[in-house]
Image (tube, rainbow, N blue to C red):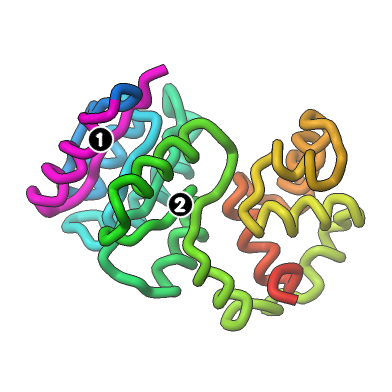
Amino acid sequence: MTLRVAIVDDEDLIRTGFSAIISAEEDMEVVAEAADGVGAVNIARSGAADVILMDVRMPKVNGIAATRQILEGAGTHLTVPKILIVTTFENDDYVYQALQAGADGFLLKRTRADDLLAAIRLLARSDSLLFPDKIRRLATSHRGLKPHLLAQAGLSQRESQVLKLMANGLSNDEIARELFLGRETVKSHVGSIYRKLAVRDRTQAVIAAYESGLVGT
């Protein structure tokens, strides 16, 4: 399967560079480009891309806001693309905002080409989240904001285990192996977690894990 990638960045040079790297791969093609968040939303709504590389600071609509708009309107899309935030700014606030918006990953623009390509493949072909190791610091600044969240949601002990592993970046398959469960059982637990926490996706569940104090203990 050829992975369809869109590049959204307000710098022509960045788009050209990313496009050259991606287009050289046999299993990828660049299907669209845009210079602002408005273009990103339009690409997502067209169903043209499997993965969108999204800059943060852009005119009209920034990357975080565009990510939020894309995922809030996911029911109207032909397909829901994975969103990889790629930015110059190594800032915990950006990482947390990306999580809140529902992004699937976060990389710095200085990342090696091979790592960028590996990230695109990971997000396109699995249910993993991809964030740098420094996201663990979020446990310090955001941990415990809602200490009763999980208890109020009524998560079972097993669901709490699954949520913690999700927050640590494990995919459903990896969680299944870790807990010696079937993949369908894990998917059932994940769906139950979403319903009980009243969240729409994996990243929203991860936020709950941080804010409840489940992660970082």
Q: Residue at x 86, y 55 (%)?
A: 155
Residue receiving disc 1: 22
13 sits left or right of 63 in the view: left
Q: Which mark is residue 180?
A: none
Q: Amino acid at mark 2?
A: Gly
- Is the N terminus in the top left, top right, bottom left or bottom right quadrant? top left
Q: Residue furthest right?
A: 157
Q: As drawn, is 161 to the left or to the right of 9?
A: right
Q: Quadrant of residue 16?
A: top left
- Among all residues in the image, which is located at the extreme left? 12
Numbered disc 2: secondary structure:
strand
Expressed as whole percent of the image width and height from the top left, the position of residue 30 reads: 23, 30
Quarter of the view holding residue 186: top right
Q: Residue furthest top?
A: 1
Distance from label 1 to label 2 (Cα)? Answer: 17 Å
State yes or no: residue 11 in magenta: yes
The image shows residue 19 at horizontal and vertical percentages of 18, 37
Disc 1 versus disc 2: nearer the observer: 1
Q: Is residue 46 visible?
A: no
- Label 1 or label 2, whichever comes before in sequence order: 1
Quadrant of image for the C terminus:
bottom right
The x, y position of residue 169, in whole percent, is 61, 53
Asked which secondary structure carries label 1, the reply is helix
Which residue does the image show at 40% across and 39% down from the upper left? 120
- Residue 14 lies within the magenta run: yes
Q: Which residue is mark 2?
A: 105
Say what amino acid the circle numbered 1 marks. Answer: Ile
- Magenta-drawn segment: 1-25
Q: Is residue 34 above or below residue 207?
A: above
Residue 197, image x and y in percent?
Answer: 74, 54
